[in-house]
Amino acid sequence: MGRKKPKIKISVDLQRALVPPIIFDDHGDVELFKDLESLIFDIEPIDVKKAGFCYYDSTGRQLFVSMEEEEFVVRDGGLTENGLATLRGDLRHMLQEIDEPAAETAELSELIRALSQSAGIRGYQWQR
């Protein structure tokens, strides 16, 4: 039996601007998701409320995820040098953890590609 699709509130402009895969970063433990819905399905509302996690698209655009009643709300955090540096460092750390070390100078796209080839991209099929 399939799972129900989560309720997500996101602007049309942000939805169009997102470039998959979507990245979930739990203090250096990084996972890739095929789309925003797959990511939202995998996280618990209580974890979103506690915060501490970082979310990005594959360009490094930071996403802010919060809960409003029964809906996940996703806002654009933009591209920042600090966010990009953190994401690159956490991707390199994750690759090292799975015995796939990456060069210090590796581009964001190379790091994401390496992690997707080694660890895969998570996704779900939704019931209608």
Image (cartoon, rainbow, N blue to C red):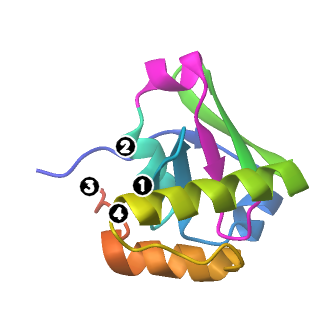
Q: Mark 3 and 4 residues: CB-CB less than 8 Å, in contact?
A: no
Identify the residue position indicated by label 3 in the image: 127
Q: As shown in the figure, which amino acid type bears the numbered disc 4?
A: Gly
Identify the residue position indicated by label 4 in the image: 123
Q: Position of residue 1 (x, y in %)?
A: 10, 50
Q: Position of residue 37 (x, y in %)?
A: 48, 53
As measured in the structure, the alpha-carbon distance from the residue carrying label 2 to the one carrying label 3 is 15 Å
Residue 38's disc is: 1
Q: Nearer the viewer, residue 17 or 102?
A: 102
Q: Is residue 33 above or below residue 82?
A: below
Is residue 121 shown in magenta?
Answer: no
Q: Mark 1 and 2 residues: CB-CB less than 8 Å, in contact?
A: yes
Q: As shown in the figure, which amino acid type bears the numbered disc 3?
A: Gln
The boundaries of the magenta stretch are: 44-61
Residue 58 seen in the figure? yes
Badge 3, how many Cα within 10 Å: few under 14, some, many 20+? few
Tell me: 32 left or right of 3.
Answer: right
Q: As shown in the figure, which amino acid type bears the numbered disc 1?
A: Ser
Image quarter in which the C terminus is found: bottom left
Q: Is residue 101 above or below residue 42?
A: below
Residue at (57%, 75%) from the top-left corner?
A: 111
Q: In front: mark 3 or mark 4?
A: 4
Identify the residue position indicated by label 2 in the image: 42
As measured in the structure, the alpha-carbon distance from the residue carrying label 3 to the one carrying label 4 is 13 Å
Q: Mark 4 and 1 residues: CB-CB less than 8 Å, in contact?
A: yes
Q: As shown in the figure, which amino acid type bears the numbered disc 2?
A: Asp
Secondary element under disc 2, as helix, strand or loop, is: helix
